[in-house]
Image (tube, rainbow, N blue to C red):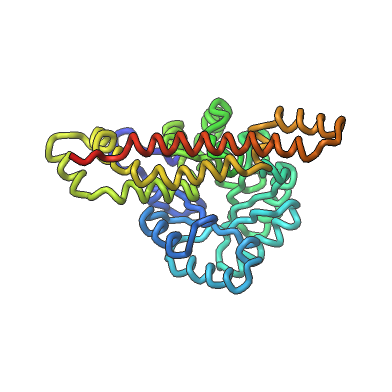
Amino acid sequence: MNAMEPSSRTPAPLTVYGTELASRLFLGTAQYPSPEVLARSVRAARVDVVTVSLRRETARGNAGERFFELIRALGTRVLPNTAGCRTAREAVTTARMARELFETRWIKLEVIANDDTLQPDVFGLVEAAAELARDGFQVFPYTTEDLGVAERLVGAGCEVLMPWGAPIGTGRGLANVFALETMRRYFPSTPLVVDAGIGAPSHAARAMEMGYDAVLLNTVAEAVRAGILAVSHGQTEAALALGLRRPRALRLIIIPQAMRVIIPPLASTYLSLTKNSSLAVAIGYPDLVSVGGTSLNQTGQAIEIVLVWMVVYLTLSLLTSAFMNWFNARMKLVER
């Protein structure tokens, strides 16, 4: 297992497909407000690997071409993915296009079964992984924590597994801790990367504490990293000079100041999640939608039912916003 040696202060490099990676953070490239913010994020995080959706960026035409040029200029290893593919055939075709475009055998394999939760289609995933491995690809499969599926993926030639922590975009953290811990014990020498669901620094820390080798983050990573980097390095040096150990300095000095920068973008992320109705129907409000749908079918009062749903979503959004504003005010520095 590529875990940190107990007697060492520095983590051993993570080795995947014979390549050593100094960073245990894989960074996504979607939903950044601008290419400049993305570039700053990648440089600040000092990541070795960024993931890129070939289908999404190709669909943007000239803008997608400029995006690919930016990714190449960052100097990090590119891990193309097959996001948006719903069949094994689509995923294999997209992977071959990515190999030609980025000149890499690495591919993050995604075959989606459900449009709301973006849950992996494990049957198509194993089929595509086997074909790509035979074609010389080095496959990083986005999968569930199911051990049977994981065994089949390893048997198909995958040397890395990327189980989800929770459905993509939910930010719920590690939803099934027992299953993830079992997977870690079951595959002690296989690099495991938690992919999807990370919504807070504590989620990523928990995954690493469980023995996982790396985590994949997207926009939340940028918010947290930017907040920490916004605190002057002199603050850390002063804390160490006073005799504080680094963990204590981080908890008492750095994090309280960084939260002033972290909270506003996180509030926007949480509000976007709350208002993402398709995702909410799948994981958050099934009872509400089910009862509303039944009432709609029986009464035909579609406008009234939809208004009720809107009021509920609006109320949750306002409550989320109010809480984050209150928390932001509590964390604000007080001028003397």
* Residue 167: image location, x then y, percent: 61, 39
* Residue 187: image location, x then y, percent: 55, 35
Answer whether residue 113 is visible to the viewer in this image: yes
| Residue nearest the viewer, comparing 327 with 144 | 327
Residue drawn at x 63%, y 71% as measured from the top left: 61
Q: Quadrant of residue 250?
A: top left
Q: Is residue 50 above or below residue 190?
A: below
| Residue nearest the viewer, comparing 209 with 227 | 227
Quadrant for the C terminus, please.
top left
Q: Is residue 325 above or below residue 26?
A: above
Q: Residue furthest top?
A: 178
Residue drawn at x 44%, y 47% as measured from the top left: 265
Question: Does residue 92 appear to the left or right of 32 in the view shown?
Answer: right
Q: Is residue 173 above or below residue 55?
A: above
Q: Quadrant of residue 287?
A: top right
* Residue 320: image location, x then y, percent: 51, 36
Residue drawn at x 47%, y 64% as measured from the top left: 35
Answer whether residue 149 is visible to the viewer in this image: no
Question: Does residue 284 appear to the left or right of 236 in the view shown?
Answer: right
* Residue 26: image location, x then y, percent: 47, 50
Residue drawn at x 27%, y 48% as measured from the top left: 231
| Residue nearest the viewer, comparing 255 with 92 | 255
Q: How many marks?
A: 0
| Residue nearest the viewer, comparing 90 with 273 | 273
Q: Residue furthest bottom?
A: 62
Q: Residue furthest left?
A: 242
